[in-house]
Amino acid sequence: MNKIYIASVLMLLLIIGSSGCGVVSTKAHAQQVATNLFEAIRNKDFDTAMTFYAPEFFEETPVDWMQVLKNVNAKLGDLETYKLDTWSINKFMGTTGSGTYFKAQYEVTYSRYTATEKLTLFKPDTGSEFKIIKHDIESFGLFLE
């Protein structure tokens, strides 16, 4: 009985340990997209920044998003630092498609003001990469001047 118990515990630990690797890998892949976005914005390479957004983002965004990013840069200043504050990963399975959501909140320092930026990225199970489907920028500096 002790051997069965020990084997069961070891199997359980193996399952728990291997499932955690998926979360770490998923977080790393999604976070790399966010890093690439912030680096493109830091370099004022707004054309490259646009490539990290999903087509669905532009369907739901009724404004010229590139111009929004340029306006944010003009009001808040040059992007200096960004730090992941909170994050979550959710797996979705449904009739319209399945995939993984990564929601992240970043604390971003610009040369004139700070901002809280919330990103939602989605990766369909079809094997494509994470793309940004939502981007909220909150800063007191956007209401000034």
Image (spheres, rainbow, N blue to C red):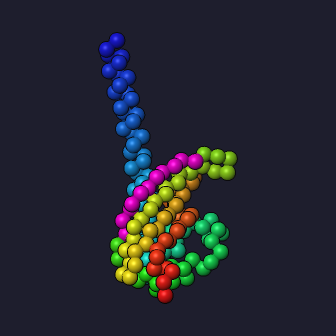
Identified at 40% across, 34% down, the residue is 15
> Residue lying furthest top in this view?
1
Residue located at (42% from left, 40% from top)? 19
Which percent across, then down, holds residue 26?
Answer: 44, 52
Q: Is residue 9 above or below residue 89?
A: above
At x 38%, y 23%, the residue is 8
Q: Is residue 25 left or right of residue 98?
A: left
Residue 36: where, in percent of width, then height? 42, 69
> Looking at the image, which residue sits at the far bottom?
145
Q: Position of residue 71 (x, y in %)?
A: 51, 83
Q: Is residue 81 above or below residue 31?
A: below
The relative height of residue 137 versus residue 46 in the rendered view (above or below) is above
Location of residue 111 (image quadrant): bottom left
Whether residue 41 is visible here, answered yes or no, is yes
- Given residues 37 and 76, the one toward you in this image is 76
Is residue 45 rendered magenta in the image? no
Give the vertical position of 6 relative to 15 (above or below).
Answer: above
Number of marks in the rendered image: 0
Chief SS of the magenta region: strand
- Image-quadrant location for residue 12: top left
Identify the image quadrant of the N terminus.
top left
Which residues make up the magenta segment?
82-92
Picture coordinates of residue 60, whole percent (x, y): 64, 68
User: Can residue 70 be seen here?
Assistant: no
